[in-house]
């Protein structure tokens, strides 16, 4: 077995750094030479990691009776020694740490095959096998075999998106185990050379000069984005769309005027029937379903905001709903919606695919409401449509058409100053106050204040639609 040295982390490439290096040499270099310059992960990334821990814990139950090697012990005592001591025991090893061929890799589950061999089981929170997973497992196999451990098969345990929770979680059904041995073997070809090339990057005196591009978000969102993208002039990071839309975008940027296709905007406005119901859902979705009858990552609506305008330019009324406990919120949400959506009038949403998707799932999961939900879906009008088609385009949108880009471009004010300013944060906040999800030791003390923040955020989403429609109506009159 290779010798473990205290400074091993400085002298070998870890599995995660190998993956970083495949994505971008500049990121890899910073991870070794200028860690301080890498911004910390934000709350949404942290939530993904926390979810990964829960998924990992459940996957271990598929291989019971194993030993868990805590990473801290490696850092203090030398985990490799623990792992190699555990190997002869012939029991599964969780978080097995392996060092071989200049690579350090932790294997989620190393399962004995009964014939002196081992299976690598990599656990992922995704719902399919992705290309990056094959590189990830290839480097594990490489380290294991260089460390003298015979690997029989490589398996990927990923979330099965068709699983529907019924009472307790059935771990055997929550995961799908896929044999990826052959694909992993393909990725082993040339792996030693790639490691050598990455090792050469790490010891360079200066950071490699890498231009920003699509590799900044694939396969992972790069933590250096706030640094690299900020350093670029605004026009370089502006999203340039294609075709006719690009002509509109360039012309609007040049003239600094809002582009309006009057005929198409009038068509759009003609589809609206008063009273108008501006509707927005907030949802949560987790890898391990929290409620009965729910699938992994199914987006469960827990909140809505509704602004109602009875006539053009008329007064607004508002109604909101926010679930207040861990029980399934959907039936109460449906009842609240039914009490306020009346029987006629357009239901205005932004990105109709999302709202109608949730409504369709509600109809499937609550069939008694299905006929009514069908009528609701038939009344939906998508306020995103004129922006998606560039029938209305303001140069400050910079090629973007989300409500978060359109609202400030058209009205001069946006979501600044909001304690909660995006859907991901709203979702994580709700999970924390209701289900206690989130990092330990970071309990929310003032739940009432946080609920007010959630209500304010969702309310602004529908008020934003009202304001945007006001601008469209004004532009149509010009
Ligand atoms: S943001 Fe892009 S260019 Fe910068 S380190 Fe990350 S991947 Fe490389």
Image (tube, rainbow, N blue to C red):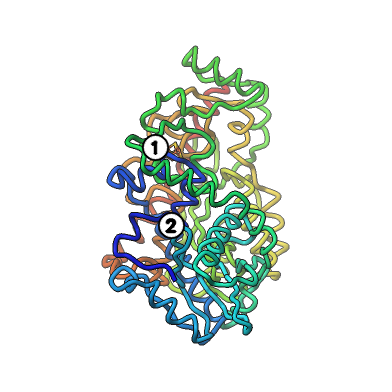
The quarter of the rendering in which ligand 1 is drawn is top left
Residue closest to the far top: 255
Q: Secondary structure at mark 2?
A: strand
Circle 2 crowding by C-alpha within 10 Å: few under 14, some 14–19, many from 20 = many
In the image, 355 versus 122, the foreground residue is 122
Label 1–label 2 contact, CB within 8 A: no
Q: Toward which corner of the image does residue 392 lie, by quadrant?
A: top right
Q: 1 above or below 317?
A: below
Secondary element at tag 1: loop
Of residues 313 and 223, which is closer to you in this image? 223
| Residue 38 x, y percent position in the rendering | 33, 45
Q: Which mark is residue 156?
A: none
Q: Is residue 278 visible?
A: no
Q: In the displayed structure, does residue 327 sit left or right of residue 274?
A: left
Judging by the rendered image, the residue that carries numbered circle 1 is 414
The residue located at (64%, 68%) in the rendering is 160
Q: Calculate the distance from the C-alpha at mark 1 to the C-alpha at mark 2.
A: 42 Å
Rendered image: mark on residue 14:
2
The residue under the point 61% across, 57% down is 134
Q: Which of label 1 and label 2 is nearer to you?
A: 2
- The C terminus appears in which quarter of the rendering? top right
User: Picture coordinates of residue 251 (x, y %)?
Assistant: 55, 15
* Chain-order first, disc 1 or disc 2: 2
Say above or below: 319 vs 329: above
Q: Residue at x 41, y 45 (%)?
A: 28
Q: Nearer the viewer, residue 66 or 334?
A: 66
Specify the quadrant that holds the N terminus: bottom left
Position in image of residue 391 (x %, y %):
62, 26
Counting from the top left corner in percent of width and height, residue 163 is at: 65, 72
């Amino acid at each position: 077995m290779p010798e473990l040295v205290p400074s091993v982390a400085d002298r070998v490439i870890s599995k995660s750094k190998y993956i970083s290096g495949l994505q971008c040499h500049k990121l890899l270099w910073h991870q070794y030479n200028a860690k301080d310059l890498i911004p910390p992960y934000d709350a949404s990334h942290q939530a993904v990691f926390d979810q990964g821990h829960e998924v990992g814990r459940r996957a271990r139950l598929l291989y019971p009776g194993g030993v868990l090697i805590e990473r801290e012990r490696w850092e203090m005592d030398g985990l490799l020694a623990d792992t190699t001591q555990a190997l002869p025991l012939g029991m599964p090893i969780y978080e097995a740490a392996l060092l071989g061929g200049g690579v350090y890799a932790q294997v989620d589950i190393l399962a004995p095959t009964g014939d002196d061999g081992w299976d690598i089981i990599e656990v992922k929170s995704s719902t399919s096998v992705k290309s990056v997973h094959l590189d990830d497992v290839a480097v594990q196999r490489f380290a294991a075999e260089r460390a003298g451990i015979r690997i029989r098969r490589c398996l990927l345990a990923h979330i099965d998106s068709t699983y529907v929770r019924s009472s307790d979680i059935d771990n055997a059904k929550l995961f799908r185990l896929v044999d990826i041995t052959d694909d992993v073997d393909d990725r082993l070809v040339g792996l030693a050379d790639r490691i050598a090339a990455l090792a050469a990057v790490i010891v360079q005196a200066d950071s490699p000069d890498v231009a920003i591009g699509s590799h900044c978000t694939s396969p992972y969102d790069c933590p250096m984005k706030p640094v690299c993208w900020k350093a670029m002039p605004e026009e370089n990071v502006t999203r340039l769309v294609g075709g006719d839309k690009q002509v509109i975008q360039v012309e609007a940027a040049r003239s600094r005027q809002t582009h309006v296709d009057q005929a198409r905007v009038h068509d759009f406005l003609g589809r609206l029937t008063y009273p108008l119901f501006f509707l927005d859902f907030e949802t949560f979705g987790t890898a391990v379903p929290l409620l009965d009858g729910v699938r992994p990552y199914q987006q469960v609506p827990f909140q809505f905001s509704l602004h109602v305008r009875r006539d053009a330019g008329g007064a607004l009324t508002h109604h909101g709903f926010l679930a207040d406990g861990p029980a399934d919120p959907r039936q109460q949400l449906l009842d609240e919606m039914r009490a306020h959506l009346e029987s006629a009038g357009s239901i205005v949403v932004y990105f109709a695919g999302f709202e109608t998707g949730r409504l369709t799932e509600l109809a499937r999961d609550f069939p008694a409401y299905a006929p009514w939900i069908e009528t609701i879906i038939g009344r939906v009008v998508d306020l995103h449509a004129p922006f998606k088609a560039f029938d209305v385009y303001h140069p400050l949108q910079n090629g973007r058409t989300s409500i978060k880009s359109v609202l400030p471009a058209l009205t001069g004010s946006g979501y600044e100053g909001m304690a909660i300013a995006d859907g991901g944060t709203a979702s994580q906040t709700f999970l924390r106050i209701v289900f206690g999800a989130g990092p330990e030791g970071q309990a929310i003390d003032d739940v009432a204040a946080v609920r007010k923040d959630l209500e304010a955020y969702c309310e602004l989403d529908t008020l934003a639609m009202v304001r945007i429609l006001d601008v469209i109506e004004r532009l149509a009159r010009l």
